[in-house]
C-alpha cells in the first residue's frame, strides 16, 4: 500500500477532490482514483471522504493506493499480427475467436496472455491484474485493431482520447438486406436491457451513440458497408444496425440466432472488422493510424456474394 498526504492550498480550494488528486499524482487516472476513493482509500481531516467532496484551504488529505499486483496470468507464446509498436503502445490485428482479456474461468488463450509474452513486464497496470495494458476491447468474434499500452502515462492519454471520442475508428461489415441510402447516420442512445442485462439496446436515457454509415457495395440480399464510430459504446454497431432492420450477417445475439445463413456461409459470430484505428500518440502528440487488412474469411465471403 502506498500512502500519500496532501494539504489543500488556497489555489485548489473549492475543487472536487477526485479532480484535484489526479493533478497531484503523476500517472494515476481519475477513473482509477474514483475507484480507490469508493473503496474507502481517501480521508479528509481524518474522516472517510467521497470523490464529490469540495475541499477547502487547509484540508488534510490522506490517500492509500494499493500496490500494483503482478498479474497471475500465464504469458503464452501466441503469434501476434502487429500493426504498430513502439516503447509506449502496441496495436495488433486480433483474429476471430480470440477474447481480449481473461475473465473468471477463462484465463488462457486471450490477447492479454499473448501480449504478456511479447511485452514482458512492459504493460500498463492501471486496469488491474486481469487487463494489463488494455485500454479498450472488441468482441471475441469481431476482428481487427486493438491498442494496448506499455506504461501508465500512455494508458491515461489513450483512455482520455477514448473518453473524448477523438479516436478514429472505422469498421467494415456486411448487413442483411439492401440499404437504400448511400450514407446515413444513426443517432440512438444505448444502454443495458432490463430484460437481459447481457444485451444492449436502444434505451431512453441511455448514453448517446452515433454511427456513420457508408455503403461500399450492394449485393442481392446484403450490403457491404463502412461504419465510423463517433462514439464507442458496447455493441454499438451491432445494436444500431439491428435497430434499423439490417442486422449484421452472422450476429446471433442481435440478429437471428437460428438463421440458416450461419451454416450456409460457415459463419461463427458477426461479420465485423475493426479496420482503422487512428489516435494521437501519447508521447509525441503526432497522429498515428493503423489499417488492419480484412481477414481471409471476410474477403472470401465478399467473393461469394459477388
Image (cartoon, rainbow, N blue to C red):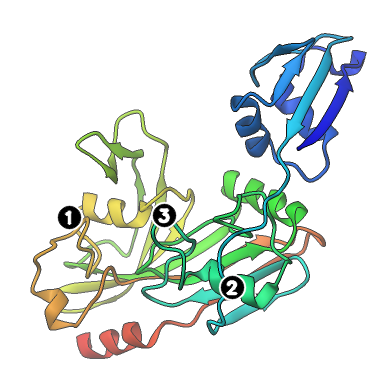
Q: Label 3: which residue?
A: 104
Q: Position of residue 255 (x, y in %)?
A: 18, 59
Residue picked out by circle 2: 75
Location of the C terminus (image quadrant): bottom left
Q: Which of 158 and 7 is in front in this view?
A: 7
Answer left or right for 266 relative to 122. Answer: left
Residue 85 lies in what quarter of the image? bottom right
Relative to the observer, which residue lies in front, 12 or 226? 12
* Picture layout, residue 12 above or below residue 243: above
> What is the crowding at mark 3: few (fewer than 14 residues within 10 Å), some, or many (at least 20)?
few
* Residue nearest the viewer, comparing 136 with 2: 2
Relative vertical location of residue 192 with respect to residue 60 in this rendering, above or below: below
According to the image, label 1 marks what residue?
245
Q: In terms of sequence position, does the residue under pointer 2 or pointer 1 come before the other?
A: 2
Residue at disc 1, secondary structure: loop
Q: Where is residue 244 in the image (x, y as percent from the top left)?
A: 22, 52
User: For residue 189, which quarter of the picture?
Assistant: top left
Is residue 243 left or right of 149 when viewed as pictured?
left
Q: Where is residue 284 in the image (x, y as percent from the top left)?
A: 82, 62
Residue at the image point whose x is 22% and y is 57% from the top:
253
Q: Nearer the viewer's eye, disc 2 or disc 1?
A: 2
Amino acid at each position: 500500500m502506498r500512502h500519500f498526504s496532501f494539504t489543500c492550498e488556497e489555489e485548489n480550494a473549492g475543487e472536487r477532490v477526485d479532480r484535484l488528486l489526479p493533478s497531484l499524482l503523476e500517472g494515476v487516472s481519475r477513473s482509477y482514483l474514483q475507484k480507490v476513493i469508493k473503496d474507502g482509500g481517501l480521508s479528509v481531516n481524518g474522516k472517510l471522504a467521497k470523490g464529490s467532496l469540495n475541499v477547502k484551504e487547509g484540508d488534510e488529505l490522506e490517500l492509500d493506493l494499493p500496490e500494483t499486483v503482478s498479474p497471475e496470468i500465464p504469458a503464452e507464446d501466441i503469434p501476434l499480427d502487429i500493426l504498430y509498436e513502439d516503447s509506449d503502445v502496441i496495436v495488433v490485428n486480433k483474429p476471430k475467436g480470440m477474447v481480449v482479456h481473461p475473465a473468471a474461468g477463462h484465463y488462457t488463450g486471450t490477447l492479454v496472455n499473448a501480449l504478456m509474452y511479447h511485452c514482458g513486464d512492459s504493460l500498463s497496470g492501471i486496469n488491474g491484474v486481469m487487463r494489463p495494458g488494455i485500454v479498450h476491447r472488441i468482441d471475441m468474434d469481431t476482428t481487427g485493431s486493438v491498442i494496448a499500452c506499455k506504461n501508465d502515462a500512455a494508458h491515461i492519454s489513450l483512455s482520455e482520447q477514448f473518453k473524448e471520442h477523438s479516436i478514429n475508428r472505422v469498421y467494415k461489415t456486411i448487413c442483411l438486406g439492401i440499404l437504400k441510402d448511400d450514407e446515413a447516420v444513426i443517432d440512438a442512445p444505448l444502454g443495458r436491457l432490463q430484460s437481459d442485462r447481457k444485451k444492449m439496446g436502444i434505451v431512453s436515457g441511455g448514453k448517446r451513440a452515433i454511427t456513420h454509415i457508408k455503403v461500399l457495395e450492394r449485393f442481392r440480399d446484403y450490403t457491404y458497408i463502412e461504419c465510423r464510430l463517433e462514439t464507442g459504446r458496447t455493441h454499438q454497431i451491432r445494436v444500431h444496425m439491428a435497430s434499423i432492420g439490417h442486422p449484421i450477417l452472422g450476429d446471433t445475439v442481435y440478429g437471428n440466432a437460428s438463421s440458416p445463413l450461419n451454416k450456409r456461409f460457415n459463419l461463427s459470430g458477426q461479420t465485423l472488422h475493426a479496420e482503422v484505428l487512428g489516435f494521437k500518440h501519447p508521447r509525441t502528440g503526432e497522429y498515428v493510424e493503423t489499417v488492419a487488412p480484412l481477414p481471409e474469411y471476410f474477403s472470401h465471403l465478399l467473393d461469394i456474394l459477388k
